[in-house]
Amino acid sequence: MRALKPLIQLPRNFSNKPFLSPVHRGDITRMLVSKRCISTYTEEPDMRDFMEYMESLKNYEKSGVPKGAGTDSDEGFDLGRMRRLMDRLGNPQSKFKAVHIAGTKGKGSTAAFVSNILRAEGYSVGCYTRFLQLWRSPYLPKRMLTFQLSRLSIFTAGLGGSRDATNIISHTGLAASVITTIGEEHLAALGGSLKSIALAKSGIIKQGRPLVLGGPFLPHIEAILRDKASSMSSPVISASDTGIGSIMKEVIVYKGRPCQSCDMRIQAEGDFKLFTELFDVNLSMLGRHQLQNAVTAACVALCLRDQGWRLSDESIRAGLENTYLLGRSQFLSAKEAEALGLSGATVLLDGAHTKESAKALMDMIQMTYPDTPLALVVAMANDKDHLGFARELLSGMQLEAVYLTEADIAGGKSRTTSPSLLRDCWIRASKELDINILHDEMAEYQELSKDQLSPAIILAAENSPLFSMRMVNQILRKRTGDGSGIIVVTGSLHIVSLVLASLQL
């Protein structure tokens, strides 16, 4: 089986450095590429006791979030504790304006876009997202723990909205609320339905303050959000409204990175009268979903401009073009692939972990490398829709092999799904879709070396992610003859973090 020529060719000296502020770039890079992603604390011994104390507290990322914890009900988290803590600290959240972002998917990317638009204009911007949480390490520099005084700060909700710890921002301190998407994730914690999830996320809407919607949403879900905004006298702009649109024209290599060249036009005539046109915007964040996030961020910027913030079209363009996040459609450089023992391989890291994000990932690959053979390495948390995720990936592209593996979550295995359980889900999905697979519990699997041209997708469970990557690389090379396929590591931002931490740069 031969792959068609990819739409983009990555240069061998391709550099994949993320766009981070100079203050944090070095610190985060050291956290990511450290062999074990930990520090010996020799530089800052006072941090050891602090981090040990923090690790001794209840860690819901490690143990899982309780049922109903994110709902605005008696089962929901108590924000009173967070307010008392902020009160003891002098209520620092009242000393700057904030953009508060919630959503099932897209909030981290949208936050990065908005932050970089503001920085491009010269503002001092604070940004709190799960980006820092993803690459968890006992080592966090002091200046990252201290939220520096900024004119405007961007916050993303970690769970829902109503009872998330970030939802202590008053309406007087809020510049805008943003809700990117609504999907079926954290169902138990957020009430069990799309409607309850929408209600939880709508909790960040504040009296009289603007609401920016990403979308597109199901009609009854958008109605919930707009009804809440109406009850709070909050004006609304939606990135999915008529008059707001974007076009992805082509995929190019720009400044050493694969980029999608796009046009976008925003003309709002409802609660807001906003307008901008941007042509040939080169986004390093790949995929139509990221283009939608970029349009949402541009709507936020125009909403801020409407409130008197100085934001030029040039800064909007620069902020969008300079945004890049690790683990989001991230192609490794040739040097990085070689460091993993995958010399000559094309390796893509993406933290997709829902069926919606799996579809977005497949669409992005089809856009950049149409009809190219793929081999997947997948690890997932135990509270995700494993079957839906498998269905989406099995039906989306030309798969040659899938290795199911595991990666620790928050330093433990209590929320990790075993490779064998994942394999069972993928076997079930393949039967539902009538897709031919050859898995490692079948007798025929042992004869695999004698039949390299078998059309079946090879499916195996393996505890080591790095060994899994090397195995699928071998399979791709044997099946394509020239190694022209792509190794995709996905299913969790934790496995992405593990791979990045293994790199020696």
Image (cartoon, helix red, strand yellow):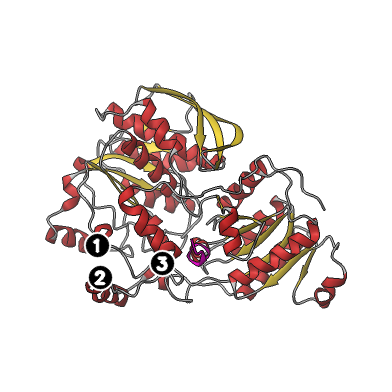
At which x and y percent is residue 318? Answer: 41, 33
Query: Is any atom of residue 134 visible in this view?
Result: yes
Q: Amino acid at mark 3?
A: Lys
Q: Nearer the viewer, mark 3 or mark 1?
A: 1
Residue 298 covered by magenta stretch: no
Answer above or below: position of 245 versus 251: above
Numbered mark located on residue 67 in the image: 3
Numbered mark located on residue 142 in the image: 1
Q: Amino acid at mark 1?
A: Lys
Q: Earlier in the sequence, mark 3 or mark 1?
A: 3
Q: Earlier in the sequence, mark 2 or mark 1?
A: 2
Secondary-structure class at tag 3: loop
- How many numbered circles are shown? 3
Q: Is residue 283 left or right of residue 228?
A: right
At which x and y percent is residue 175? Answer: 26, 38
Which contiguous range is marked in magenta? 499-505
